[in-house]
Image: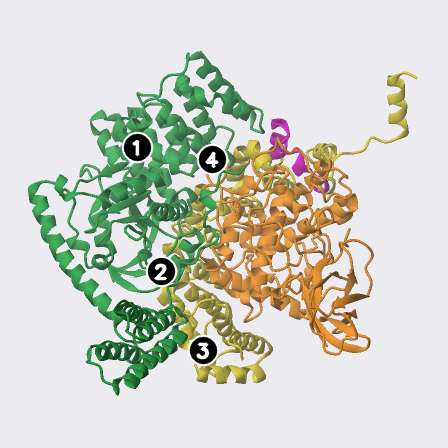
Chain colours: A orange, B green, C yellow
């Protein structure tokens, strides 16, 4: 007797990634030999490759409590039976396929599938393997200046900056931007999730020569020999310029002047108050450095930019959870829609993914549509501002964006 | 290009003095205008920002003498494609000295406003090369708003936009300028009928057309060698022939998004329009880089694909590996360099006819894709009968040569297509011919098994070929044909069935031989269809 | 009880909640108050970005702090940082930008070197012509230099059109110091005609690791085939340094096209497999990465 399991309702191995938000899955009988009747009770359990590896939980229905195992009546006809799987909060994977779901009929193992609980983590807490996979994938995306990264660099320039800054669409736009980049990284290595730089804390394992590098006296970032970022090239010039200002040591100190997480989350329950975090801590985190990352025209040249913004997005995600602000239509989740500049209203599609150019939009739209995912359908190729809010599918399961943060539980 | 202007290397202050002198002499304003050509020697080996200072000073000098019809194109070019605050501000100021305010100028002013609005850097016009470092400055948006005020009633259409701007987060100084502009426009009376847009654009001479018979020959550049986006080498002569071409010049390191990046994105839209109009296989496109030393095949391909270009043998990105200077002279390219790097260039797009001769050019001002495609189709459909007798004779000679080559080529192509490509094909042909031949021999009993054997041999060979190529249609046809032939032998026989059977057998055998691996279609990139969806907010 | 008394009672009993905007105004007042201590003012500056562009008075107040040479340098730098942070909010910063850029140009010649460097850095990253002119003048005439040559070169590399190739080549030939040479080489990486310079430095085993790394990266950009040929030689050369071998392997492993294919053969695989087990830690890692690219 055998059963087949599908994660995210897909047979593709590229879809075997889950986060804290429940993923729709299904099971069906592929070989009913030995089945005692028209259906068999199959019990699903999770086996973790190690104590530090991922764990998943199950539930039968779209809502309800999760459990560490689940028993499903699976017909021998081969009809599929749906169920849901989610990563158990606090137990993200460290490697691809370090979680296995086993299917048993009684005590007999009749099927299984390996998957990963893929979560955005604090960059300072990554294992060496996680760090290296991320760096390798990012370097490949850059491809010494000739890779797809050039589009991401060109999405964030002075000309395009009004699409994404200084107005309420700042957070939604950057969420979509990071998601697009992360999916491109995952097309290179599906085990990669974008890590975040927790700028209100020291980061001794992030600012090392093995990871984001160490600045020399003149502000040139240095890496260990053979590090893929040695060949990091943007605008035809190789290298990363970045140096901490005012004798600040990022390995032992938080970014000076940057609002703490608690203070940021206390900016208010209304989006109009919270979004002032664009100035501080976001702007402060950019400007505690001298170098590319400290100015809009050049900020996206530095790979650290994306870890910085991942933390900005994490803060928004946390604020959303704290204040139940996943529904963009709800008052307080957003501000000023209808009277904001173009690209900053809830029903606006966002440049560059909408391909709209000219007039109040930039003259070109690099990168094309937003990258798709084998795991989820949202937010679509041309997302609107409002499509970025319900990232966990709390309001509508179909809105799930396929990412989660290690310290932001499911709402 | 005037010889009066010194082309020896000058310091910037010498240059500024020279321009000041020209501005004082109305008879020599033509030399000022000549210096606005990008390839003018005064710009050789100058960096981009140096050229900005130089060109800005020339625009300000033109403002002293008054912008004329001849110089207007350069002023509008800066408003249309410029991103540098100094140049845009200088152009806006210069425009106010033109003697024919017109509503046709308003779109240029507003486009420039949208471009520089969030990059509204301070500029100083006090002296050559001055950079504003105090509170005494102007900005491009202020100059542009002043220009709207100058346009007066001609700018009535933008009053709603100006009033809306007033409520947005602009500086007090700009709001004050907007108030003055609104007042000036309202005071200037009712709206003035715009000079016909096409008539206005026609007077700019940013688009030029050459009739058949007046086009420059391509002898000097026929042998220019290009490497395309796949690394394949091809000469000018071999690529630009037999069909019209739309050719854009660009380079990947251009940092003005209104120029090269937009040009290539628009070329991609042109490609889509060509497909829509059913002429994509009759009009080719090419993007040629100004920077062949840096723009390798890999870079060209990435750049083009990122902007939605469909690349194929008829739609290529090219760099000249030899003869770039010849190309530059032939096209009279508006570009200059500092060492190998482009320091300044204009927008330029050309339509070449089927002999590779320049038939049309679009320069400086942004062209509309529809306009370019329509012109290219016009070139495609050029009728010899409309030309002079001498040109007709010339074209006829060329056409005859081309036709002969074409017929021979077609025959050769058919032969290649139908030539048996494998032993199975040979078996198919022979067995088919054998069936036909046997059919002609007068009846003899011993021929029947041979006849049936030939049919099955033919069937088997076509079946094997079909399995190899994945296309079973040939086999099905041959099967039906074989059945028809067999039926024609039963009883009194049916000649019609026999003929039909033979025809089907022939068709099926030929089809199975012709089929190869199947066509490969260009990858539809992520940009496909985005520009032709209904506008979405 | 009347409405007024109710409101007064209410305000006495519960403190008015501070909105972010209100906090910013309070912080602004502190930051621009020269009677407060530098420490207090610097701490307040981090809250200021929101208030900078609220009106012209605010803007001029903070710009005055930045321009004023009598103010303590740390306070001026904190003011600069606040303005920089505010500049990320492009739409709301629009009213401030012109004065901000003018002030940056003014302080580019400030007596304090750090203020000069920060101002010129912001301008150079914006490809400002004023900054480029000053930096090049400083490289050509050291007595007019506003920044050390290595920093000037680094800032000029923000714009490939900055007219700096000639001076950069001169710096490579006659470097004032090693770091200046490295920055000059990086700048030249955008110059297609400088490939021979990079080939020469890459081959030279006496060169520093940084110079050879920069040369490898530059050559990879300008002429990938040449780089792959050199990378192969370096990896096969048992007498060459570990570090450059690791870098060369990375060059071969991280390209995403086929340009390196012509230089990959069994001899190279064999040597890389040896390095995977016998090389230094960095070489082993690079070797693993290289081999995994080819499924080995």
For the residues labelled 1 and 4, the Cα–Cα distance comes to 21 Å
Instruction: Say which element carries label 3.
Output: helix
For the residues labelled 4 and 3, the Cα–Cα distance comes to 53 Å
Numbered tag placed on residue A359 in the rendering: 4
Image-quadrant location for residue B489 = bottom left
Q: Chain of mark 4?
A: A
Q: Which residue is mark 3?
A: C234
Q: Which residue is mark 1?
A: B73
Magenta portion: prevailing SS class: helix
Viewer-nearest of labels 4 and 3? 4
Viewer-nearest of labels 1 and 4? 4
Magenta region: C42-64
Residue shown at the point (46%, 72%) measured from the top left: C207
Residue in the foreground of this view, choosing between A196 and C190: A196
Of the numbered discs 1 and 2, the one sitting upstream in the chain is 1
Residue in the foreground of this view, choosing between B242 and B293: B242
Viewer-nearest of labels 1 and 3? 1
């Amino acid at each position: 007797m055998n059963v087949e399991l599908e994660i995210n309702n897909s047979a593709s191995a590229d879809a075997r990634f889950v986060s804290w938000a429940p993923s729709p899955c299904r099971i069906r009988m592929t070989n009913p030999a030995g089945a005692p009747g028209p259906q068999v009770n199959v019990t699903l359990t999770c086996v973790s490759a190690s104590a530090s590896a991922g764990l998943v939980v199950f539930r039968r229905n779209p809502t309800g409590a999760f459990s560490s195992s689940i028993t499903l009546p699976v017909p021998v006809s081969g009809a599929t039976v749906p169920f849901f799987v989610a990563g158990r909060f606090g137990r993200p994977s460290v490697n691809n396929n370090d979680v296995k779901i086993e299917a048993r009929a009684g005590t007999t193992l009749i099927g299984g599938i390996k998957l990963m609980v893929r979560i955005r983590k604090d960059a300072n807490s990554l294992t060496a393997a996680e760090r290296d996979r991320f760096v390798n994938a990012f370097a490949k995306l850059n491809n010494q200046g000739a890779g797809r990264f050039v589009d991401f660099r060109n999405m964030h320039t002075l000309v395009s900056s009004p699409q994404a800054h200084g107005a309420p669409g700042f957070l939604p736009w950057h969420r979509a931007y990071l998601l697009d980049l992360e999916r491109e990284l995952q097309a290179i290595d599906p085990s990669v999730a974008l890590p975040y730089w927790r700028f209100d804390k020291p980061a001794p394992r992030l600012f090392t020569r093995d990871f984001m590098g160490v600045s020399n006296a003149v502000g040139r970032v240095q890496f260990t020999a053979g590090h893929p970022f040695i060949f990091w090239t943007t605008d035809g010039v190789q290298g990363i310029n970045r140096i901490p200002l005012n004798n600040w040591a990022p390995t032992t100190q938080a970014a000076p002047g940057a609002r703490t997480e608690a203070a940021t989350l206390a900016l208010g329950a209304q989006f109009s108050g919270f979004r002032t975090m664009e100035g501080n801590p976001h702007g402060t985190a950019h400007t505690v450095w001298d170098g590319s990352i400290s100015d809009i025209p050049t900020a996206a040249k530095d790979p650290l930019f994306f870890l910085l913004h991942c933390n900005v997005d994490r803060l928004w995600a946390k604020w959303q959870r704290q204040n139940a602000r996943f529904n963009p239509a709800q008052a307080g989740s957003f501000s000023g829609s209808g009277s904001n500049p173009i690209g900053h209203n809830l029903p606006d599609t966002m440049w560059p993914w909408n391909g709209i150019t000219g007039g109040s939009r930039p003259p070109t739209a690099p990168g094309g549509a937003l990258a798709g995912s084998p795991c989820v359908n949202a937010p679509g190729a041309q997302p609107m501002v409002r499509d970025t809010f319900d990232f966990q599918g709390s309001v509508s399961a179909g809105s799930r964006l396929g990412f989660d943060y290690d310290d932001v539980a499911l709402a | 290009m005037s010889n009066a202007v010194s082309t020896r290397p000058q310091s910037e202050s010498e240059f500024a003095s020279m321009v000041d002198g020209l501005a004082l002499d109305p008879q020599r304003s033509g030399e000022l205008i000549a210096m606005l050509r990008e390839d003018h020697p005064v710009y050789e080996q100058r960096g981009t920002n140096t050229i900005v200072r130089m060109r800005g000073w020339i625009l300000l000098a033109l403002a002293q003498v008054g912008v004329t019809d001849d110089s207007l194109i350069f002023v509008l070019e800066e408003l249309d494609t410029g991103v540098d605050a100094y140049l845009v501000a200088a152009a806006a100021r210069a425009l106010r000295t033109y003697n024919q305010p017109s509503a046709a100028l308003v779109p240029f002013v507003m486009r420039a406003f949208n471009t520089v609005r969030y990059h509204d850097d301070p500029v100083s016009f006090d002296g050559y090369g001055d950079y504003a470092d105090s509170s005494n400055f102007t900005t491009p948006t202020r100059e542009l708003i002043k220009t709207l005020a100058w346009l007066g009633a001609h700018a009535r259409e933008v009053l709603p936009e100006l009033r809306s701007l007033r409520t947005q987060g602009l500086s007090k100084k700009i709001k004050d300028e907007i108030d003055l502009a609104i007042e000036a426009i309202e005071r200037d009376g009712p709206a003035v009928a715009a000079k016909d847009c096409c008539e206005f654009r026609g007077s700019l001479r940013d688009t030029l057309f050459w009739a058949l018979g007046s086009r420059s020959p391509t002898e000097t550049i026929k042998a220019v060698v290009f490497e395309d986006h796949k690394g394949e080498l091809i000469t000018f002569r071999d690529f630009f022939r037999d069909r019209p071409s739309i050719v854009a010049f660009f380079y990947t390191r251009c940092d003005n998004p209104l120029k090269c990046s937009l040009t290539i994105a628009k070329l991609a839209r042109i490609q889509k329009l060509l497909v829509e109009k059913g002429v994509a296989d009759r009009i080719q496109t090419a993007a040629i880089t100004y920077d062949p030393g840096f723009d390798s095949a890999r870079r060209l391909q990435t750049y083009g694909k990122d902007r939605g270009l469909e690349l194929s043998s008829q739609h290529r990105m090219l760099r000249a590996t030899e003869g770039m200077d010849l190309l530059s002279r032939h096209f009279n390219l508006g570009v200059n360099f500092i060492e190998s790097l482009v320091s300044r260039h204009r927008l330029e797009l050309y339509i070449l006819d089927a002999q590779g001769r320049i038939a049309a050019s679009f320069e400086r001002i942004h062209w509309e894709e529809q306009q370019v495609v329509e012109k290219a189709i016009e070139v495609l459909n050029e009728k010899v009968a409309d030309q002079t007798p001498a040109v007709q004779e010339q074209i006829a000679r060329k056409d005859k040569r081309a036709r002969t080559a074409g017929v021979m080529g077609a025959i050769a192509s058919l032969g290649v297509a139908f030539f048996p490509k494998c032993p199975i094909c040979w078996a198919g042909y022979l067995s088919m011919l054998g069936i036909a031949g046997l059919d002609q021999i007068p009846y003899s009993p011993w021929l029947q098994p041979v006849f049936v054997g030939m049919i099955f041999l033919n069937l088997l060979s076509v079946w094997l070929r079909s399995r190899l190529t994945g296309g079973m249609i040939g086999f099905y046809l041959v099967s039906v044909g074989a059945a028809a032939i067999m039926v024609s032998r039963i009883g009194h026989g049916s000649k019609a069935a026999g003929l039909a059977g033979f025809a089907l057998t022939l068709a099926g055998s030929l089809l199975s031989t012709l089929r190869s691996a199947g066509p490969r279609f260009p990858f539809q990139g992520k940009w496909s269809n985005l520009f032709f969806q209904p506008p979405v907010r | 009880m009347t409405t007024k008394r109710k409101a007064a009672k209410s305000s006495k009993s519960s403190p008015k909640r501070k909105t972010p905007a209100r906090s910013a105004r309070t912080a602004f007042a502190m930051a621009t108050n020269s009677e407060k201590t530098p420490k207090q003012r610097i701490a307040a500056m981090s809250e200021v970005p929101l208030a900078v562009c609220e009106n012209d008075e605010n803007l001029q107040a903070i710009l005055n702090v930045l321009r004023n040479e009598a103010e303590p340098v740390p306070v001026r730098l904190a003011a600069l940082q606040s303005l920089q942070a505010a500049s990320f909010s492009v739409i709301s910063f629009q009213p401030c930008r012109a004065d901000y850029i003018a002030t940056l140009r003014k302080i580019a010649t400030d007596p304090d070197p750090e203020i000069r460097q920060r101002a010129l850095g912001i301008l150079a990253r914006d490809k400002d012509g004023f900054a480029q002119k000053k930096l090049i003048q400083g490289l050509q005439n050291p007595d007019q230099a506003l920044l050390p040559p290595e920093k000037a070169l680094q800032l000029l590399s923000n714009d490939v059109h900055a007219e700096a190739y000639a001076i950069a080549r001169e710096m490579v030939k006659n470097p004032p110091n090693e770091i200046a040479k490295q920055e000059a080489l990086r700048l030249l990486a955008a110059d297609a005609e400088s490939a021979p310079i990079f080939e020469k430095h890459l081959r030279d085993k006496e060169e520093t690791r940084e110079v050879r790394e920069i040369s490898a990266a530059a050559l990879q950009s300008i002429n990938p085939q040449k780089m792959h040929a050199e990378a192969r030689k370096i990896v096969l050369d048992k007498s060459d340094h570990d570090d450059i071998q690791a870098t060369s392997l990375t060059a071969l492993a991280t390209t995403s096209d086929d340009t390196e294919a012509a230089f990959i053969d069994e001899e190279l695989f064999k040597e890389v497999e040896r390095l995977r087990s016998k090389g230094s830690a960095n070489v082993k890692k690079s070797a693993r990465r290289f081999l995994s690219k080819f499924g080995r």
